[in-house]
Amino acid sequence: MTLLSSFGERLNVVVVGATGGIGGAFVDLLEASDRVERVFAFSRSGQSRPGHKIVRGIIDYNSEETIVAAAQRVATWGPCQLVVVATGFLHDGQGEGPEKSFRSLTAESLSTSFQVNTIGPALVARQFLPLLSRDSKAVFAALSARVGSISDNRLGGWYGYRASKAALNMTIKSLAIELSRNRPQTICVGLHPGTVDTALSKPFQSGVAADALFEPLAAAERLLTVVDCLTPDHSGQTFAWDGSPIPF
């Protein structure tokens, strides 16, 4: 398997959310790639698995200082070619889960959704976009979700998750427009992994067909394949795991 063939060699890549199901799979695949020289694996605990290419560190969305410090650390190693934000919040595993009705809305749950799904990735972009290579293909990608599409919303519910992912999509679009002015080779996209067998989706897998429930490693591989096919014309969009664009 050849990943990231549209990029150069000796790549520096960043994964935020490296201890999650999909984030950990990204780290595994990227470390195994001959094209990748170094994987910066960031998480709240800083305890991503060890590896000879892996540089571990802490990014906690509740502490902007950790994002700044992480970017400063990466900057000492030279430009990056790929930044993947693999974080997301749907539920805390307690209570009723994602909101089924407006009657379930609380300031606390909405705040958490936006902090993890929108604000955190935006602050990562603020610090890490300047570190992306200017003279070759470079990609900033954040995990989004099909349910963040306003035009695709036919069921309602899941207010905080839907709204915060829609806000992430808008952030990605704005970033792409700004980047196109002075970094024409930098691509900024959202990625929808499908339903992946992780703790986030576990309570909602009963109605998912077996062939539509992906293992984390397979999901990460599909998403990296999508990233490999991206060109600057794709910047600002959100793509599903099969490469199909998702409308806003």
Image (cartoon, grey):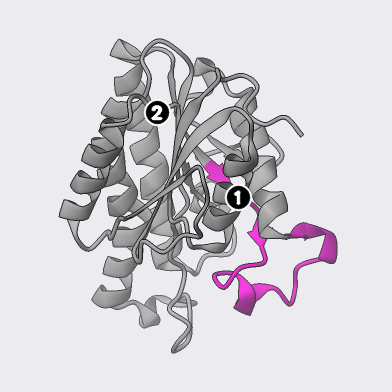
Query: In the rendered view, would you say 192 is above or below 112?
Result: above
> Relative to the observer, which residue lies in front, 4 or 246?
4
Which amino acid type is marked by label 1? Asp
- In which image quadrant can residue 244 be found? top right
Asked if residue 153 can be seen in this view, the reply is no
Q: Position of residue 204 (x, y in %)?
A: 64, 75
Q: Position of residue 29 (x, y in %)?
A: 63, 45
The reply to whether discs 1 and 2 touch (Cβ–Cβ < 8 Å) is no
Query: Which residue is label 1 attached to?
Result: 28
Query: In the rendered view, would you say 164 is above or below 221?
Result: below
Helix, strand, or loop for circle 2? Answer: loop
Label number found at residue 80: 2
- Crowding at dot 1, Cα within 10 Å, few <14 / some 14-19 / many 20+, comes out as some
The magenta stretch spans which residues?
Answer: 191-214
- Spatial CA span between label 1 and label 2: 18 Å
Which residue shows up at 32% across the image and 74% down it?
A: 109
| Relative to 85, 108 lies left or right | left
Residue 195 lies in the magenta stretch = yes
